[in-house]
Image (cartoon, rainbow, N blue to C red):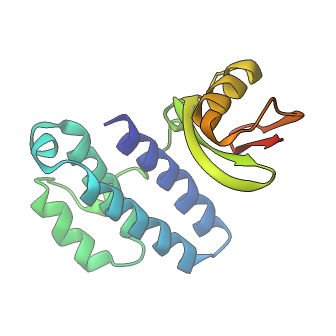
Amino acid sequence: EKELNRVRNNTIKCVTNDLGVFSFNTAVARLMEFVNAMYNYEVNVAKKNAIYKDCAKDLVLLLAPFAPHFCEELWEMLGQKYSVFNQSYPTFDPAAMVLDEVELAVQINSKMRAKVTVSSSASKDEIEKAALEAVKDQLSGAPKKIIVVPNRLVNIIA
């Protein structure tokens, strides 16, 4: 649920920016990514959950400039009374776009060896510890140096 909300807010932000610079192809591509995220959301949970309906409404509002007649029909199917063009454009919540956890690539001598998931607020020491734990069987001896690129990767020089 949190991930779908993050994707939704990120899509609103990116589509708004893309429309502002007339990058229509990338705006449509981001809408397609949003639809894929909605498909991946668990169907059983989606029927019970209000966030799925909110996502559908936002998708229709974002798609309306590209397919106005189609979106009017979808808007009506969603049970809305007034025209889709009488609605305010969706806004994004920056707080909802923050990741709780990040997946980092763990490399040994610049070769990918594992992936590790850590808290986005994890310290450098915590990240190093998790990375070493993930590849401890592949290391021969103590590492010479550990390079941490925040939110991206950990490179262990052996």
In what quadrant of the picture does the N terminus appear? top left
Q: Residue 136: percent from the left, percent from the top?
A: 64, 33
Q: Residue 91: percent from the left, percent from the top?
A: 48, 44
In what quadrant of the picture does the C terminus appear? top right
Identify the residue at image location x=79%, y=54%: 110
Foreground residue, 40 or 149? 149
- In the depicted structure, whether residue 58 falls above or below residue 91: below
Identify the residue at image location x=10%, y=45%: 44
Q: Residue 76: percent from the left, percent from the top?
A: 13, 62
- In the depicted structure, whether residue 35 falls above or below residue 142: below
Foreground residue, 116 or 99? 116
Asked if residue 74 lies left or right of residue 23, the reply is left
Looking at the image, the residue that sits furthest to the right is 144
The answer to whether residue 99 is visible is no
Identify the residue at image location x=14%, y=40%: 45
Asked if residue 40 lies left or right of residue 122, the reply is left
Q: Number of marks in the image?
A: 0
The answer to whether residue 119 is visible is yes
Identify the residue at image location x=37%, y=34%: 2
Snapshot quadrant of residue 3: top left
Asked if residue 157 lies left or right of residue 60, the reply is right
Looking at the image, the residue that sits furthest to the front is 140
Q: Residue 31: percent from the left, percent from the top?
A: 42, 66
